[in-house]
Image (cartoon, rainbow, N blue to C red):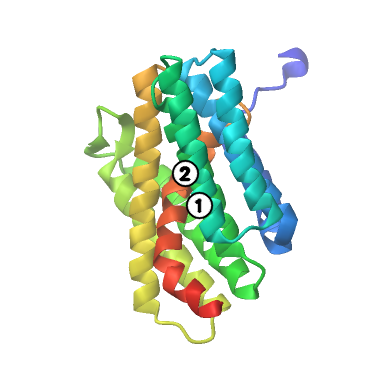
Amino acid sequence: MAGGTKPRSNLQLRIISGVILAAAVLVLTWWGGFPFRLFAAAMAAAMFHEWMTIRGENHKVHLAISRFALAAALALMLVGFAPAFVFAGLFVAAAVAAISGLATGRGLWAGWGVLYAGLPAATLIFLRGNAPEGLWTIVFLFAVVWGTDTIAYFTGRALGGPKLAPSISPGKTWSGAIGGAIGGVIASLIVAYFAWDSVNLLMVAIVAILLSIASQAGDLFESAVKRRHGVKDSGNLIPGHGGVMDRVDGLVAASVLLFVLWIPFLAGME
């Protein structure tokens, strides 16, 4: 390197870009409203692009129809339609993309991609809402997912041991998975302590464990998708992390699960 400057290691890039990304996401989460909805929609659009790119999809008509279907569903989110309309729109969009895929001989991949990208965007938007409780709900979710991911990474590297799913992701270990779950629970309890005056910490821990498991399952699912298609990363948008799917793989499953768990609470706020 010129001037004797050493290139940054992948871990350094991962940490730097992760901190910058986390800060930006937290600001948008605090802001809420349209900026947060726009962030969620942009995340979904990027995920769908990577989902189709992994497949090597190049049928122009099918791509155009599928993208338009997802864009229409995302527009419902951006405008602020009620959950019933948004979820109905998402499933209609998925059906349109699936029918397009079948008609052009491309299969159901695009239809599944609409749901994979759209459902977490919708659940994040509705969990956030416009109330202060929504802000802390999203922070709680991020704390579990990021705590799980970070502690799993370092615990797995430090302790090693038996592989969690060697045929899917050879680098993941049981020690990392268990350490990640513990990290997610600790992070959730810290947020709960500062966020809510009266809360059942045992229930918080149970929810955090479920979310941590979902997060790690989402990570494994994305790894399986990449392995099936022979790619290492879903993209290269985020330095040190790969693509958007690589960064939010755990958030996809965890956000949907938290929304399902939160439905009674959200209904009570209406």
Quadrant for residue 171, please give it. Answer: top left
From the viewer's side, name the closer residue of 120 and 217: 120
In the image, 62: left or right of 215? right
The amino acid on which the numbered mark 2 sits, given as a three-letter code, is Phe
From the viewer's side, name the closer residue of 186 and 2: 186
Residue ID for mark 2 = 91
Q: Secondary structure at mark 2?
A: helix
Q: Position of residue 31 (x, y in %)?
A: 73, 61
Q: Secondary structure at mark 1?
A: helix
- Crowd band around label 2 with a 10 angstrom C-alpha radius: few (<14), some (14–19), many (20+): many
Quadrant for residue 21, please give it. Answer: top right
Tell me what residue is drawn at x 51 percent, y 23 percent.
Answer: 52
The vertical placement of 33 against 62, above or below, is below
Tell whether label 1 touches label 2 (CB within 8 Å): yes
In the image, 227: left or right of 29? left
Rendered-image quadrant of the N terminus: top right
Residue ID for mark 1 = 87
Rendered-image quadrant of the C terminus: bottom right
